Image (tube, grey):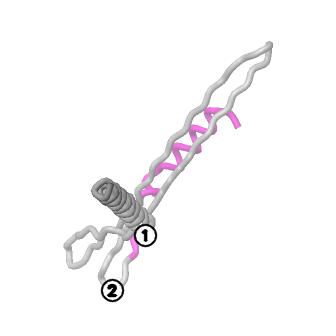
């Protein structure tokens, strides 16, 4: 595959259909799911010792963002719950609290030792 074919495939990968799902209608309610999609890539060509070469790569990351819910002519945005983001946030807060607690306890013990000397 050459770089031009790679870029063509990348362009098709990050299309509107990747971000917005087909609408689903049931009982008078229409739902259009949406995703947060990011992509990046690169490619190049070169020559060494009389030989030519080319290469490239592309990456795509998608995760649920939410859905547009259409009911009785009204549209509302319903955000998706991202368990990875929630877990990451909880872990970061827990680590911060543990480190802060260890630092505080260490200082208190040092102060106590100096007071008894």
Magenta region, residue range: 1-24
- Please check the rendered image and state whether residue 22 is part of the magenta-colored stretch, yes or no: yes
Q: Are marks 2 and 1 in contact (CB under 8 Å)?
A: no
- Please check the rendered image and state whether residue 68 is part of the magenta-colored stretch, yes or no: no
Q: Mark 1: which secondary structure?
A: helix
| Residue bearing mark 1 | 83
| Residue bearing mark 2 | 27
Q: Residue 100, can we see it?
A: no
Q: Quadrant of residue 9?
A: top right
Instruction: Say whether residue 76 is left or right of residue 88.
Output: left
Q: Main secondary structure of the magenta part?
A: helix
Q: Residue 42, can we see it?
A: yes
Question: In the image, what residue occupies the spot 38% across and 63% down?
Answer: 98
Instruction: Say whether residue 28 is left or right of residue 9.
Output: left
In this rendering, the answer to whether 53 lies above or below 62 is above
**x and y percentages locating residue 32 in the rendered image:** 36, 68
Question: In the image, what residue occupies the spot 23% across and 70% down?
Answer: 76
Mark 2 vs mark 1, CA separation in Å: 29 Å
The circle on residue 51 is none
Q: Mark 2: which secondary structure?
A: loop
Residue situated in front as seen by the camera: 14 or 40: 40
**x and y percentages locating residue 30 in the rendered image:** 33, 75
Q: Name, please, the residue furthest toward the bottom.
A: 27
């Amino acid at each position: 595959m050459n770089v031009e074919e790679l870029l063509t495939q990348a362009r098709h990968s990050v299309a509107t259909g990747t971000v917005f799902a087909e609408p689903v209608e049931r009982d008078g309610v229409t739902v259009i799911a949406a995703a947060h999609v990011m992509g990046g890539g690169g490619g190049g060509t070169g020559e060494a010792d009389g030989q030519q070469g080319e290469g490239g790569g592309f990456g795509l990351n998608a995760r649920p963002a939410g859905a547009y819910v259409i009911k009785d002519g009204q549209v509302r945005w319903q955000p998706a719950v991202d368990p990875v983001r929630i877990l990451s946030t909880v872990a970061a807060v827990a680590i911060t609290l543990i480190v802060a607690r260890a630092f505080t306890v260490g200082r208190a013990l040092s102060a106590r030792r100096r007071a008894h000397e």
